[in-house]
Amino acid sequence: MARSKSSLISSAVSFLILGGIASFASGRVTCLFTECYLVISGSSIFDAKGVKLDQGVASIIQNAPIPLFGIGGAFLIAGLVKADDPKD
């Protein structure tokens, strides 16, 4: 499947943006013993408000930025290295 240079770069930008969002969200996930929360508002643990998460979902959110940034970087390198098609 041949992909054009612009589609590779746009895919890279999409994955990098998703990685940034996942990085922000992973910093907002807090687990206390067996309960995990995605903190929505509050400046400390005493006044924090958030959404209760399953431990599996919390671990996916916490580990998602690494593969998303990796895939985005791979698409970016592929888009920058790919030669322009003479037909375009």
Image: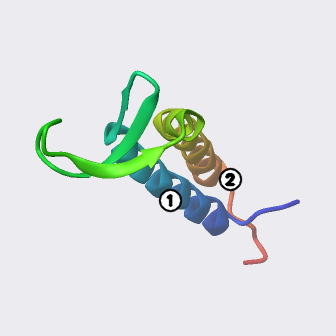
Task: Give the labeled residue for mark 2.
Answer: 82
- The residue at 72%/78% (across/down) is 88
Judge by depth and name the residue closer to the eye, 16 or 40.
40
Disc 1 residue crowd, few under 14, some 14–19, many 20+, Cα 10 Å:
some
Location of the N terminus (image quadrant): bottom right
Q: Quadrant of residue 27?
A: top left
Against 30, residue 11 (above or below) is: below
Please tell me the numbered disc located at residue 13: 1
Mark 2 lies on a secondary structure that is loop
Disc 2 and disc 1 in contact, CB within 8 angstroms: no
Q: Which mark is residue 68?
A: none
Q: Name the residue at 55% across, 54% down.
A: 15
The alpha-carbon separation of the residues under discs 2 and 1 comes to: 16 Å
Q: Residue at x 17, y 35 (%)?
A: 45
Residue 53 point in image, percent of width and height: 48, 44
Q: Say few, some or many: other residues with alpha carbon within 10 Å of mark 2 (under 14 / 14 to 19 / 20 or more).
A: some
Three-letter residue code for mark 1: Val
Q: Residue 54: x percent and y percent?
A: 54, 40
